[in-house]
Image (cartoon, helix red, strand yellow):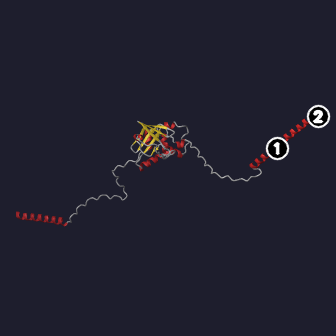
């Protein structure tokens, strides 16, 4: 009895095991999971900016003067004449640098009334360029410079806007031939751009001194033409005058002789009457 029950239990267990194995082995094997794909980047999406720092641009002279204060008139002239943009652009294109002599508002106020208003736009540009040297100069460099110095307004030739800069100790003096000014301080210096405060506006001779008028060319010498003698010519008049003088002299001599003869006759008659 017990043996029969064990056999039946073993049979049922084997049947269940066989069904389980048949069901499990009959199913297809599960494919391995694929790795997750990265999201596709749009074609026109912006690229990630580089972490490299952007090199700084050239210094802005107007911002430097605004920060220093006291240069309102100079800043206005630099902007209106476009010299500020010219300096900034050329600082990008050259390694020589620039030097700016910056007159203060007080220096401009010491000018004769109406001086700036009397200038044309071209003259205002030349005036501001006259304060700019196309080379960087430290204060120590002024001790060894060769004068005159060329400015942005012109060359070093006489009448072409040159400047003479001399240095004695820590004092830097500037001469235009019309104005003598001094550097009263350093506003900015970075081995590319130097801005020095000056106590006077630098007035160039070419603008503020009247030029003498250019003399007219001398006429070419002409060969005198020979003139024919006429009755009314000076030579004829001279001859007539000479002839008239000779005739008059003969008439006077004849008159004198006639008088003498008349006197002689009168004396003779008187002598006869006395006898």
Q: Position of residue 182 (x, y in %)?
A: 46, 37
Q: Residue furthest front?
A: 275
Give the left or right position of residue 165, taking residue 47 as reference. right
Between the C-alphas of marks 2 and 1, the distance is 35 Å
Dot 2: few (<14), some (14–19), or many (≥20) neighbours within 10 Å?
A: few
Select label 2 or label 1 by which is in front.
2
Residue 165: % across, % down: 45, 40
- Looking at the rendering, in which quadrant would you find the N terminus? bottom left
**In-front residue for pair 56/15:** 56
Tell which of 216 and 205 is nearer to you.
216
Using a 10 Å C-alpha cutoff, classify the residue at mark 1 as few (fewer than 14 neighbours), some (14 to 19) or many (20 or more). Answer: few
Can the viewer see residue 249? yes
Residue 103, given in percent of the width and then of the height, sits at 47, 39
Marking on residue 140: none
Q: Secondary structure at mark 1?
A: helix
Query: Of callouts 2 and 1, which one flags the residue occurring earlier in the amino acid sequence?
Result: 1
Q: Which residue does the numbered mark 2 point to in the structure image? A: 273
**What x and y, as percent, mark residue 159?**
52, 45
- Residue occupied by mark 1: 250
Q: Nearer the viewer, residue 37 or 193?
A: 193
Nearest the viewer among 53 and 128 is 128
Relative side of 5 to 154, left or right = left
Q: Image point 88% across, 37% down: which residue?
A: 264
Callout 2: helix, strand or loop? Answer: helix
């Amino acid at each position: 009895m017990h043996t029969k029950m064990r056999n039946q239990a073993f049979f049922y267990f084997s049947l269940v095991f066989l069904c389980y194995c048949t069901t499990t082995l009959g199913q297809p094997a599960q494919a391995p999971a694929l790795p997750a794909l990265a999201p596709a980047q749009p074609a026109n999406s912006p690229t990630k900016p580089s972490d490299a720092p952007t090199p700084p641009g050239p210094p802005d002279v107007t911002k430097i003067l605004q920060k220093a204060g006291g240069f309102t008139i100079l800043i206005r002239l630099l902007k209106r004449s476009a010299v500020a943009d010219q300096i900034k652009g050329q600082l990008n294109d050259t390694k020589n640098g620039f030097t700016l002599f910056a007159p203060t508002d007080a220096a401009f106020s010491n000018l004769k009334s109406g001086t700036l208003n009397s200038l044309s736009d071209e003259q205002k540009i030349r005036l501001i360029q006259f304060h700019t040297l196309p080379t960087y100069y430290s204060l120590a460099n002024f001790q060894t410079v060769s004068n005159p110095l060329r400015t942005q307004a012109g060359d070093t030739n006489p009448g072409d806007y040159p400047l003479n800069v001399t240095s004695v100790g820590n004092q830097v003096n500037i001469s235009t031939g019309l104005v003598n000014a001094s550097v009263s301080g350093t506003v900015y210096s970075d081995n590319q751009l130097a801005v020095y405060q000056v106590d006077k506006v630098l007035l160039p001779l070419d603008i503020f001194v009247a030029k003498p008028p250019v003399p007219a060319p001398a006429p070419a010498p002409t060969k005198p033409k020979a003139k024919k003698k006429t009755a009314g010519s000076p030579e004829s008049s001279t001859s007539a005058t000479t002839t008239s003088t000779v005739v008059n002299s003969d008439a006077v001599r004849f008159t004198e002789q006639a008088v003498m003869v008349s006197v002689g006759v009168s004396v003779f008659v008187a002598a006869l009457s006395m006898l």
